[in-house]
Image (spheres, coloured by chain):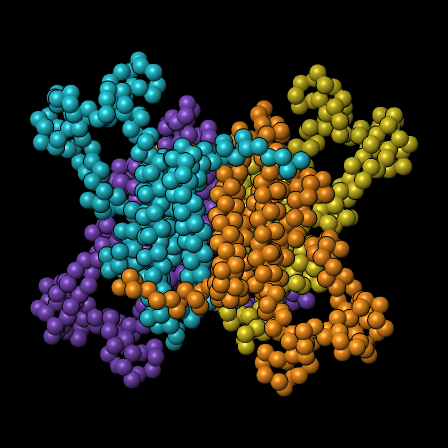
Chain colours: A yellow, B purple, C cyan, D orange
Amino acid sequence: MGKTDPDGPPHKKQSMVLVPRDTPGLEIVRHLPVFGYQDQHGHSELRFTDVRVPTSNILSGEGDGFMIAQARLGPGRIHHCMRAIGMAERALALMVKRANERVAFGKPLAEQGTVRADIARSRIEIDQARLLVLKTADLIDKYGAKGARTEIAAIKVSAPEVCLAVIDRAIQLHGGAGVSDDTPLAEFYAHARTLRIVDGPDAVHIRSVAREELARERPYAG
Amino acid sequence: MGKTDPDGPPHKKQSMVLVPRDTPGLEIVRHLPVFGYQDQHGHSELRFTDVRVPTSNILSGEGDGFMIAQARLGPGRIHHCMRAIGMAERALALMVKRANERVAFGKPLAEQGTVRADIARSRIEIDQARLLVLKTADLIDKYGAKGARTEIAAIKVSAPEVCLAVIDRAIQLHGGAGVSDDTPLAEFYAHARTLRIVDGPDAVHIRSVAREELARERPYAG
Amino acid sequence: MGKTDPDGPPHKKQSMVLVPRDTPGLEIVRHLPVFGYQDQHGHSELRFTDVRVPTSNILSGEGDGFMIAQARLGPGRIHHCMRAIGMAERALALMVKRANERVAFGKPLAEQGTVRADIARSRIEIDQARLLVLKTADLIDKYGAKGARTEIAAIKVSAPEVCLAVIDRAIQLHGGAGVSDDTPLAEFYAHARTLRIVDGPDAVHIRSVAREELARERPYAG
Amino acid sequence: MGKTDPDGPPHKKQSMVLVPRDTPGLEIVRHLPVFGYQDQHGHSELRFTDVRVPTSNILSGEGDGFMIAQARLGPGRIHHCMRAIGMAERALALMVKRANERVAFGKPLAEQGTVRADIARSRIEIDQARLLVLKTADLIDKYGAKGARTEIAAIKVSAPEVCLAVIDRAIQLHGGAGVSDDTPLAEFYAHARTLRIVDGPDAVHIRSVAREELARERPYAG
């Protein structure tokens, strides 16, 4: 994606162009690791030197880059949230398994009050976040991404946060196995941590939810 | 409610008896304030000295006290949660109003990032808690309070917590007006604070959610 | 305190004047309750109608109001923090007492992991906040309130926060006794809650700490 | 370290033995990564097959393993805390640098209220944790690790927690640069996360602080 009409109207400046990986002049400068994981997402730094492709490689049409990105962002964001819920469920399942199996101080971890509290909190938080994901998906179905804009912003903040909290508790319960590759938890965490950044950092979505809330009609505030 | 058959089976020991307020021997020892509010809930300490009422004052039947209490507790708990959501919405509405009207450091509070973040957080938390209340109510409708047991426990923890967090932010935004009686916020807070205690303290409900979660079939934990 | 020279230089506009309570024209419009407590702090709304006092009632001198207020604010703020630490210690002591005495589910609360965690957290938080109060007091002794400005702002945020968290845990452990007047906890809470507002709300002090931090020389950030 | 006298008294069962890396029979099964970092700490899984070393390789004396470990643990733990404070300071310095340099929505991040709040919170938390580290070090100097036992446990919980919170905020402010290797922050996080596990997980230290607190003489609790 790049600017093809820098002086055009704001939403028509950018275009998206397909560039096959073996095009002359395209160079992969480096892959970007995430918390030490080298190949997790395939995000890379690229350098383009005198790269040429046919005009038919333009996606949709010249100047449609912004529009394509926007069209993808709403569904893309809720996708991230669904995966976050899934990771959180998996982490909770591992936590429960560990709690039932691991004995410390003479009894299974599952009999310790703080462990039980961590498990209960995780269940409550996941269930709430899932319901907001489901409601948002339903709004997208009914009114499109635009009609679900505020809910998408809300869940984009909440789902990764819940996911990280649950994974972190699961890591703690697994000790060394939680931070190493003996469980998938550390890699889950690394991936979930990027979700607070990709497709707009938390701050941007919080700003959107606030703007909507501040403008809402509210006859009962009197 | 009192023990009428101390040696009976666990669920049949208690009975509920209606005692009109002017019955001889019934004395109101004191009203219990909540924070400094004297008359908020009508909970009082009572003393019964040789009080006599007709046997027809027994509710349902002798030994049915526990059953009646249980039958009421599920619906009673979600009722508290609904009110908690309502109080939270009202507090958020007041917060938004205040943020739009009050000017500090040369601009409305609504233009300060931390205020906007508080407002957005409140909206997200309320919406999530409300969805869990609605889901729980739906489960009660379909399967009865027993079938919604875990969700009732979950929302009984979550709704008061969210409610208190939102009210507390609203108080802070109102300054002195928030802690005095210039707004309803301080009294809201006092009332909402009791919700973490009445009908079973948080710890009991967290315990229930954990027990359920630890026992759940989970083929995908592998 | 009131404006005696509205067009004067910013720091010389205000004066402080002693007005005896029985001065003709001085009317106490109402006392301001705090969370339902009517007489806790003696803050009141006053109305002055043609009140006259001798010029000798001016504190320090005409236009010295701002200076007096500033001189008092630093020491006043740390005073609040000291009291907050004291309240937190008292609340923790009550929590420990309760945990050791109260039996639920067949054992003293003190043997429940979550209760122990609450107690440990409270001790850790109090000790950290106390150390910052002590350091700040030491800085005031050595360099005056001005030299301890940032630390005063920091502890003014932190001490009330810790105090409220500890009292809230203590309330929860006491159940109904925690929110009523069977313990001093609810009144402690009400008082501690005002500390996040009086002498500058949290937001103002957070702003000061941030400003200082953003301006700090920092050769090692490279 | 291994059991040399399984039937001996509890504190004399273990011995520590030096085994040079090239001793026949010693095999490095695998290195344990931390998050995706492969070589961060040199912790490895080892296999010993008929390994023989001279008895002079026993550290201190036979059965002294537990004693040596204990002697090292107190100082070792505060060491971790000191490094945690150092990492937190470095992360805060990077956060401030980024906030001053990076422009978004038309102004430096440093002018956004939520960013300033994150910076202020970080300073306050670091300063409090540092003071507790310093107090603990002073107690160790004066009374030995045993006399500082509770404070060591307290700071072992608090310092990593503060460190992680500060690094996490710094990561968020750096966006993609925070989770990749463009900054040291992700690797800091991975390392700091192990500190809640090594030398006893949080739960163990919280238990110690609670035990001490529950047993403390407290004449003023009345």
Which residue is painted at 91% across and 32% down in the image?
Answer: A24
Percent x, y for residue C132? 43, 46
Which residue is painted at 75% across and 71% down in the image?
Answer: D18
Percent x, y for residue C160? 37, 46
- The quarter in which the N terminus of chain B is drawn is bottom left
Which residue is painted at 12% across and 65% down in the image?
Answer: B27
In the rendered structure, the answer to whether residue B163 lies left or right of residue D33 reads left
Residue closer to the observer: C129 or A47: C129
User: Is residue D70 visible from the viewing direction of this image?
Assistant: yes
Residue closer to the observer: D61 or A86: D61
Quarter where residue A217 is shown:
top left
Q: Residue furthest front?
A: D142
User: Is residue A147 visible from the viewing direction of this image?
Assistant: no
Residue closer to the observer: C154 or B50: C154
- The quarter in which the C terminus of chain B is drawn is bottom right
Which residue is painted at 72% across and 28% down in the image?
Answer: A65
Figure check: D109 above or below C124:
above
Percent x, y for residue B182? 26, 37
Quarter where residue C138 is shown:
top left
Residue closer to the observer: B204 or C162: C162
In the rendered structure, the answer to whether residue A200 lies left or right of residue C68 reads right
